[in-house]
Image: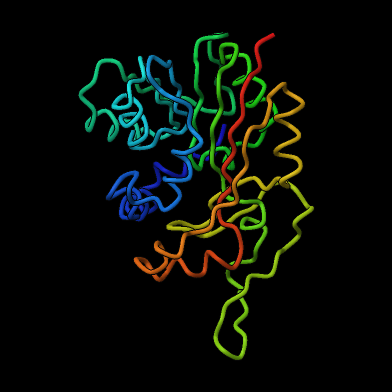
Amino acid sequence: MAQNIYDNPDFFTGYSRLPRQVHGLRGAPEWPAIRSMLPPLAGKRVVDLGCGFGWASRWMREQGAASVLGIDLSRNMIARARADTADPAIDYRIADLETLELPEGAFDLAYSALTFHYVKDFRRLIGMIHKALAADGDLVFTIEHPVFMAASHPHWIADDEGRKSWPVNGYSIEGERRTDWFAKGVLKYHRTLGTTLNAMIDEGFEIRRVEEFAPTREQVAEMPELAEELERPMLLLVSASKPAP
């Protein structure tokens, strides 16, 4: 079973105060880039893996999705999503992505934001998602960039002008990485960029677009703290499709 850190009271309290949770999708700097990678949603059957508070699930319905299934391991997340949603076409369920099984060919789009790096067996998950998608279905997801995860955050280095840099720590050593973020010992799984993309290719996906997110000049001007995200990629955004036979 995946670590359910989101039901840790200290973690959940801190996480709930993040701009992306207070302001929803408009509080996520990468959202415009993600939105540009999504297919037209009218009439689509969507599964939102790691749906959190349901921001994306509700937005997809607003864009015309026929139905959305939101899945999250956290009872706290699902309770909040249900409380904030009044739409019978959105169904929220508690499930573990490590063991989740979805019906074959049941969805036209699988979407996930900042969740897959909590999953140990990424290849099993990707294979399951491929089977759950209809022909010509799409997968769009974001994860912590492998370079970001491999950077030793507590040991950043400042040069003579005070600019920060983050030395990469064991990039090619894949597996568990633990960090203190709102709570001690948050467990994530590091995989190289090659491992991530090749697992998708091996399971039958056709990769359409890959973005290594960096904030725009306008975003940095509005939120100066984003300037440090120009030093190394923080997020990896991937769009792929399941080709028709």
Please give the name of the residue rendered at 73% of the width and 47% of the height, measured from the top-left corner. 192
Which residue does the image show at 40% across and 46% down from the upper left? 8
Residue 144 placement (x, y as % from top left): 57, 49
Q: Is residue 158 left or right of residue 91?
A: right
Where residue 181 appears, as percent x and y from the top left, is 48, 58
Task: Specify the quadrant of the image occupied by residue 51.
Answer: top left
Looking at this view, is 10 or 78 the one in front? 78
Q: Quadrant of the rendered structure where residue 67 is?
A: top left
In the image, residue 156 above or below residue 136: below
Compared across the picture, whether 203 is left or right of 226 comes to: right
Q: Is residue 76 above or below residue 173?
A: above
**In the image: residue 1, left or right of residue 121:** left
Q: Is residue 172 left or right of residue 63?
A: right
x and y, in percent, of residue 101 in the image: 56, 16
Can you name the residue that lies furthest to the bottom here?
160
Q: Residue at x 61, y 51 (%)?
A: 145
Quadrant in which the C terminus is drawn? top right
Position above or below: 152 against 135: below
- Give the tally of numbered discs: 0
- Color scheme of the displayed model: rainbow
Q: Give coordinates of residue 214: x percent, y percent.
A: 53, 58
Residue at 65 percent across and 63 percent down: it is: 151
Q: Nearer the viewer, residue 156 or 28?
A: 28
- Quadrant (top left/top right/bottom left/bottom right) for the N terminus: top right
